[in-house]
Image (spheres, rainbow, N blue to C red):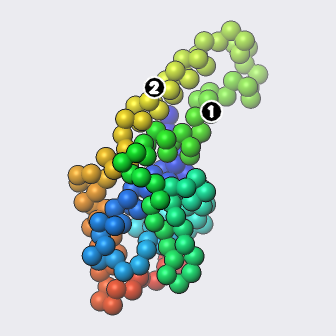
Amino acid sequence: MRLTRFSDIGLRVLVYLERAEDAAIARTQPVTVAEIATQFAIPHNHLVKVVAELAKIGWVKSTRGRNGGLRLAADPDTLTIGQVLRRLEGDENDLADCEGTDCALKMDCQLRGMLRAGMRAFYEAMDRYTLSQVTSGSTGEQVIRMHRMFWAGNDGTPPAAPG
């Protein structure tokens, strides 16, 4: 199994936002889409779609305007990686497309059930980890360094958005 790029980006956004407050000493503005796009080399348009979905779900608060930006709206101590992946990946998706093919085994195949059991086990394992656990230790320290380096300009203004 491999995560979709959408889920991968969603996780990176949540991790980055989770540590934004810890880097407040160097931050004067909320995190922007342009900042995240620069930090993770993500195409701006794709990132906008991911952020819109995270805001729709309620995990991210997005404010428009001159002083607008992104803030984490979810509780990082209770939001599990399993919850995030279920929502972004969709736990209803089968690993094998049994309905979309003309497979001769479709009616009597046990593989589909086995794959579903594996997916359940995966999500149950991811439910054991919260967003705050992901950003603890060296990962969190690196994210804080990323925030501080981004805002290290002399006047505290953000760098130009990637073109």
- The amino acid sitting under disc 1 is Glu
Q: Is residue 35 visible?
A: no
Height in image: 104 above or below 76?
Answer: above
Residue 92, which numbered label? 1
To which residue does mark 2 refer? 121
Element type at mark 2: helix
At x 56%, y 23%, the residue is: 116
Task: Please tell me in which quadrant of the rendered image residue 114 appears.
Answer: top right
Which quadrant holds residue 98?
A: top right
SS of the residue under disc 1: loop
Residue 160 appears left or right of 145: right
Looking at the image, how many numbered discs can be counted on the residues? 2
Relative to 10, say whether 34 is above or below.
below
Q: Residue at x 58, y 17 (%)?
A: 113
Q: Which residue appears at 29% of the width and 89% of the height?
A: 154
Give percent across and percent down for residue 12.
Answer: 43, 56
Placement of 26 over or under 122, stated as above or below: below
Q: Position of residue 5 (x, y in %)?
A: 53, 50
Choose the circle earlier in sequence order: 2 or 1. Answer: 1
Q: Residue furthest right?
A: 102
> Which amino acid type is shown beneath numbered disc 2?
Ala
